[in-house]
Image (cartoon, rainbow, N blue to C red):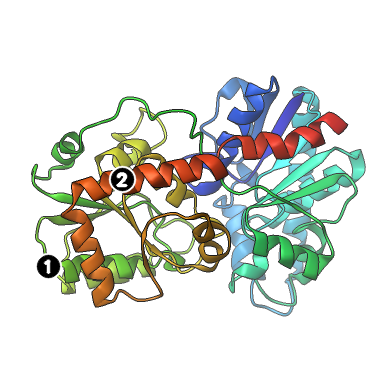
Amino acid sequence: MNIGFVSTRFSGTDGVSLEAQKWADALERLGHECFWFSGLSDRPRESSMVVPEAFFEHPGIQAINDAVWNVDTIPTSIADSIAENSKHLKTNIDDFCQRFEIDLLIPQNALTIPMNLPLGLALTDHIESSGMPTVAHHHDFYWERKRFSGSGVLPYLEKAFPPASDSITHVVINSEAGRQLNDRLKLDSILVPNVMDFEMTPEGPLASSTIKSELGFAKEDILFLQPTRVVPRKGIEHAIELVSRLEDPRIKLIISHESGDEGHDYLDSLVALAKARQVDLRLIGDLVGSSSQTPFTLEELYQGADFVTYPSLYEGFGNALLETVYFRRPALVNRYSVFIDDIEPLGFDFVTMDGNVTNETVEQVRQLLADPVRISATVDHNFEVAKRHFGFNRITDSLTPILSSL
């Protein structure tokens, strides 16, 4: 089949872009061809269609977002802009499906979180008018984020985020999301958690000293990697707290991603906190990408890190946590709800915390760092657990029946 992936962007190291590529890799192994529709893209040009208005940072879309949230009434000019952009995007989605002879659409979060209202509405209109078979891959719903609210925008959300259609199979990445989708909208779903290709060994492992040297650190320095965007729900202040209380000047905390779509106030507060707590914090998001066009790839950072901090307050699943396991790195994990429900019961071995860095947390990390033999046993154990539960087979086992029915 020709399968069309649709999202606001397929570029860089955000979770949706990375997970969509894994789905494509798994589907291509089954013999299918994959194509890409988005507003920003680093996918192959010959198999992609880029429409700027599909990107959530397009000026016209930003103007819509600035006007629709937390208000009771949508201005007429904004409603007109939503309608115009939706019509424009639907025309392009129609063209995309015709050009690449698409048999199945896989919207990646585009019918889930309303970063781009017109894109979700356009997709919904296309699916309803064409009857296009669709697998809607949902990463995080609008009701999980306080900022996506307001009675004025509710009709748009009810129509398209997500829509109810006989043509759509809904896929969620955690069990609570499936329960919420059914409770709120009476829609059934399939659970497919985030995955990694645990059958493949990471290629070209780099010595930690190589990354340290290229980042300007000393050989004896200890790199703590925070492999997330800089947004409040990532709880990065807890990583700073941990490093501060470890009281080891060799420890350097590096953040691999940039601020993203929620402003820069949080970043500014973290910089100030790190300075006050005398933590050597390095922001290297502008140096990290998914290709050789940037100085470092995310994979290289994992291989160069000594320890990973993952103190998230909330996650749709935890893509970076699987990456940590894949690259065999020890980690601190805050016990967010999805971790408690879907990950922890499987028997992983992490240093964990419950909302706060305690003296016990600090001591557990200190002892782990001092015991290379234990680190080796821990990361090997975690890899084997993840290989059983979060490999590519979770995608193929779940999607094969859907594809066969088409």
The C terminus lies in quadrant: top right
Relative side of 345 to 308, left or right: right
Whichever of labels 2 and 1 marks the residue nearer the N terminus, that label is: 1
Image position, residue 221 (x, y; %): 12, 49
Which amino acid, mark 1?
Glu
Residue nearest the observer in this picture, 178 or 47? 178
Eye-nearest disc, 2 or 1: 2
Please indicate, yes or no, whether residue 227 appears anywhere in the rendered image: yes
| Residue sitting at x 80%, y 35% | 401
| Residue sitting at x 58%, y 64% | 341
Please indicate, yes or no, whether residue 271 appears anywhere in the rendered image: no
Image position, residue 370 (x, y; %): 15, 55
Q: Secondary structure at mark 2?
A: helix
Residue nearest the observer in this picture, 247 or 341? 341
Image position, residue 1 (x, y; %): 77, 23
Check disc 2 and report the residue beneath it: 377
The quadrant holding residue 95 is: top right
Q: Secondary structure at mark 1?
A: loop
The Cα–Cα distance between marks 2 and 1, rounded to whole angstroms, is 26 Å
Check disc 1 and report the residue beneath it: 247
Image position, residue 368 (x, y; %): 23, 57
Residue 213 vertical position relative to residue 119 in the rendered view, above or below = above
> How many neighbours does mark 1 have within 10 angstroms: few (below 14), some (14-19), or many (20 or more)?
few
Residue 78 vertical position relative to residue 329 in the rendered view, above or below = below
Residue nearest the observer in this picture, 70 or 131? 131
The quadrant holding residue 147 is: bottom right
